[in-house]
Image: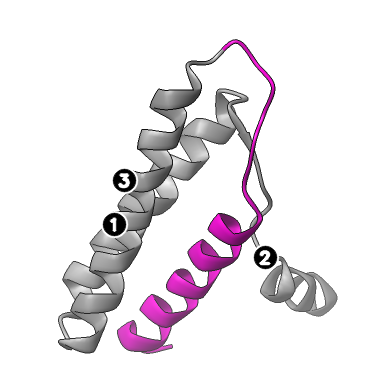
């Protein structure tokens, strides 16, 4: 898989997660949770911009930051979402 293909795959995955994200009813400051989600969206926008500029390493870094923020929020129980599982199911069939 080329770096461009990998970046495109990760961007699609982050778009899916952000499209399904729900803020959990927990003891978290919702304003801060929303700010972090907005930061994740900004990193995703950066990833798309740099992909279009064919700066795939920068794009990959940007989308990785986006995913890191989303995973951190999920691990804290502040949000709920699922990453897409299409590729995982195909890999499990081959094993």
Is disc 1 in contact with disc 3, using a CB cutoff of under 8 Å?
A: yes
The kind of secondary structure element at disc 2 is: loop
**Distance of label 1 from label 2 (alpha carbons):** 19 Å
Tell me the number on the disc at residue 65.
none
Question: Is residue 8 shown in magenta?
Answer: yes
The kind of secondary structure element at disc 3 is: helix
> Sequence-wise, which precedes: disc 2 or disc 3?
3
Q: Furthest residue to the right?
A: 93
* Image position, residue 42 (x, y; %): 29, 56
Which residue is label 3 attached to? Answer: 39
* Label tally: 3
Left or right of 45: which side holds 11? Answer: right
Is disc 2 in contact with disc 3, using a CB cutoff of under 8 Å?
A: no
> Sequence-wise, which precedes: disc 1 or disc 2?
1
**Distance of label 1 from label 3 (alpha carbons):** 6 Å
Which residue is label 1 attached to? Answer: 43
State whether residue 94 is above or below residue 20: below
Left or right of 76: which side holds 66? Answer: left
Q: Residue at x 43, y 51 (%)?
A: 67
**Distance of label 2 from label 3 (alpha carbons):** 21 Å
The kind of secondary structure element at disc 1 is: helix
State whether residue 86 is above or below residue 41: below
The C terminus lies in which quarter of the figure? bottom right
> For residue 79, which quarter of the picture?
top right
* Image position, residue 38 (x, y; %): 37, 46
Which residue is label 2 attached to? Answer: 84
Q: Residue at x 31, y 50 (%)?
A: 65
> For residue 17, which quarter of the picture?
bottom right
The N terminus lies in which quarter of the figure? bottom left
* Image position, residue 75 (x, y; %): 57, 29
**Bounds of the magenta span?**
1-27
Crowding at label 2, few (<14), some or many (≥20) Cα neighbours within 10 Å?
few
């Amino acid at each position: 898989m080329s770096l461009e293909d990998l970046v495109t795959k990760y961007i699609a995955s982050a778009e899916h997660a952000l499209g399904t994200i729900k803020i959990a009813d927990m003891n978290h400051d919702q304003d801060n949770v929303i700010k972090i989600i907005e930061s994740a969206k900004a990193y995703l926008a950066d990833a798309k911009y740099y992909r279009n500029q064919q700066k795939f390493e920068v794009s990959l870094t940007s989308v990785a930051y986006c995913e890191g923020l989303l995973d951190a929020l999920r691990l804290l129980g502040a949000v709920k979402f699922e990453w897409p599982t299409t590729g995982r199911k195909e890999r499990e069939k081959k094993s």
